[in-house]
Amino acid sequence: MTSNRNKAREVAAFFQGVATVDHVPLECPEYRDDDVGAIAREKARFAYEHLKKPLIVDDTGFFIPALGGFPGPYAAYVLGTIGLEGVLRLMEGKEDTRAWFETAIAYADEGGIRIFRGRIEGVIVAPRGSGGFGYDPIVAVDGRTLAEMPLAEKAGISHRGRALAALKEWLAAGGPDSGPHTNC
């Protein structure tokens, strides 16, 4: 469940050949919390109450230590207001260019909600590449920006890819049949 078609495309690519992923654009309230997992949990609770079928939702934060963790879980708002250029201006003169993405995926069904997390670390660089979306052009991992990587490669190493891998592993191990999972 997402209003972001790019996220839906990445998830569908990740589960290709394993499961069918349907994109359901449900408008969801904007929950606020410093923890992306808490935000994902509330979005999943809302979505499950409306759709009454198993679903996943995610929330992602972009954290820059040199800026005190900013923009954190407000990454989408910051991207929509000051954009990549604004973030790069805030980074001018900073020696520490480390940054990381963290994604929390919430799986919801009649048994409750379970959270899966993934994180990827990189450095902020001048924009490069034509793929990806969001902050991908300014975050480099092992010398290349996420926007320079093919979708399949990015999905395999990204924060969302890592959270999806944890979900996939749980599903393969029995997932919902392994018992209640509220507040896991």
Image (cartoon, rainbow, N blue to C red):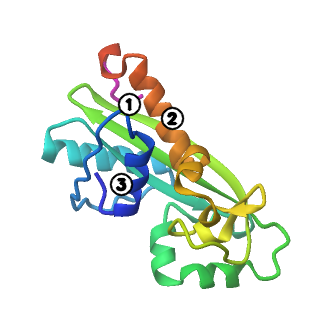
Q: Quadrant of residue 168?
A: top left
Mark 2: which amino acid? Ala
Mark 3: which amino acid? Ala
Foreground: 24 or 34? 24
Labels 2 & 3 near each other (Cβ < 8 A): no
On residue 165, the disc is: 2
Does dot 1 land on a helix, a strand or a loop? Answer: loop
Residue 55 in the image, given as x and y percentages of width and height: 27, 40
Asked if residue 76 is positioned above or below residue 114 in the image, the reply reads: below
On residue 62, the disc is: none
On residue 8, the disc is: 3
Q: Nearer the viewer, mark 3 or mark 1?
A: 3
Distance, label 3 to label 1, CA atoms, is 25 Å
Sequence-earlier tag: 3 or 1? 3
Left or right: where 100 falls relative to 80: right
Q: How many marks?
A: 3
Sequence-earlier tag: 1 or 2? 2
Q: Main secondary structure of the magenta part?
A: loop
The residue tagged 1 is 183
Distance, label 2 to label 3, CA atoms, is 15 Å
Asked if residue 87 is positioned above or below residue 112 in the image, the reply reads: below
Residue shown at the point (26%, 53%) measured from the top left: 23
Q: Residue furthest right?
A: 95
Q: Which residues are magenta?
A: 180-184
Residue 109 in the image, given as x and y percentages of width and height: 24, 32
